[in-house]
Image (cartoon, rainbow, N blue to C red):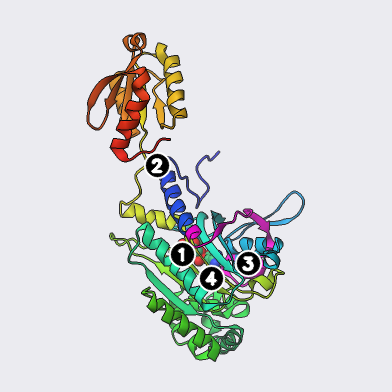
Amino acid sequence: MDYSVVKGTHDVIQGEASAYTHVENILCQVASNYGYQEFRTPIIENSGLFMRSVGEGSDIVRKEMYTFKDKGDRDITLRPEMTAGVVRSMVNARLFASSDFPVKAFYVGPNFRYERPQQGRYRQFNQFGVECVGTDSIIRDVEVIELAYNSLKIIGFDKVTLKINTLGDEDSRVAYKQALVDYFSKHIETMCDDCKERIKLNPLRILDCKVPEDQVIVKDAPELKNYLSKDAKERFDETLKMLEKLEIPFEIDENLVRGLDYYTGVVFEFTYVSTNGLNVGSLGGGGHYGKLLKELGGPDLEGVGFAFGIERLISILKDENRLPQEEGLDLYLMPLDKKYNENALELVTTLRNLGFSAEANFEGGSISSAFKKAERRSAKFALIFGEDEIKNNTVQVKDLNKKEQKEVKFDELFDFLDENLIDEDEHHHE
Ligand code: HAM
């Protein structure tokens, strides 16, 4: 029997989990400041949802989905991304019939893709993302890009690279697809098996091919910019102008096509190289989608969004030694003998109810081992008591940073701690 984690998955435990919470909280807070509301949609969806939205021609749907039949013979998939589910939820709830436009959602949660695991790439990974739906305005596209850029800055990534491209509108896409098919048909015999599939399902994806021999052919392929309609070109130019005005640096990357089929118009991705040279790939990406709502049975409205990979944000922070420190305990109780455990339980319960974070050493052992435990939990004060203290209604309070110890009367304990903890770190107690 194998009790290790499933390949491509990872445990997030102890201090690391609090780093996840910290980063997620910042992202959620920033999104709320921009007027977004949290959405929580199911992890399992009907498989058809992703075929329709992410697209049957995408690598995700063709190769990477965790799909199974449930006991009722339903065709179920663990979500590989969250845009499809969130937009579906908006359509199902008929938010476009009653709400003000646009509907703005943010979300956090696990996703599943059967990919080859490597640095920064997992089979179960977490995303934070936003969707701004019910609008085709360029200013909303820019606002979403600015939100992503600003969030990264607030977390502490100030030198991100923003790559940006436009996939054009429907007319541009049709013309460009045809040009690609015409060009690649001449070379397809010598290209990889994936490309042979892609030319039938989604010729745009050939541009993403990582096989070196194929990249040589891709280099001379027709360029999308020459097939953009006038309208699509103007939209893109205007987007870039607004980004310049907001002083958001970008690089135009004409080969950026993204791996999901629902995009039309602007697409973008953020990358970052750590001070140690670590590059975990794209920290996040997104773009504008013109047809997704309609394909999911909704109204003919457009949207824009992006998602970050939380694991990737965390691994960069870790690499740069910038993971937030776990908050230490206020108090660590040390009964000098196990026979005072019940007194300790009573006291620690009272203190916790007063709002202090506190742990007690009910496990006995030497006093020095108790101090080591307190240190490992970064406790600020140790409360030590034995027979004498209990008799006198007092407790020894040791400030573990200043290494000062003082006997404090029981009925003065709360005030004493409250005052001194505020001194230590602006801790707030009601
Ligand atoms: P995506 O580019 O497929 O877009 O994923 C977004 C981010 O999720 C990536 O940039 C990466 O940081 C992270 N990610 C993806 N796959 C993995 C993996 N196997 N392991 C670790 N991290 C991963 C989307 O999912 C779109 N739904 C984004 C979007 C929202 N577009 C419009 N709205």
Q: Which mark is residue 284?
A: 1
Stretch in magenta: 31-60
- In the displayed orientation, state which residue is furthest to the right: 72
Would residue 22 appear left or right of 229 to someone viewing this image? left
Could you say which is closer to the camera, residue 24 or residue 115?
24
Distance, label 3 to label 1, CA atoms, is 28 Å
The residue that mark 3 highlights is 100
Answer with the quarter of the image where residue 394 lies: top left
Q: Is residue 405 above or below residue 177?
A: above
The residue that mark 4 highlights is 259
The mark nearer the N terminus, 3 or 1, is: 3
Residue 309 position in % (x across, y down)? 47, 59
Looking at numbered disc 1 in the image, what kind of residue is underneath it?
Answer: Gly
> Element under label 1?
strand
Q: Tell me the quarter of the image containing the N terminus.
A: top right
> Element under label 2?
helix
| Residue depth check, mark 4 versus mark 1: number of the one nearer the observer | 1
The residue at the point 71 percent across, 64 percent down is 94
The mark nearer the N terminus, 4 or 1, is: 4
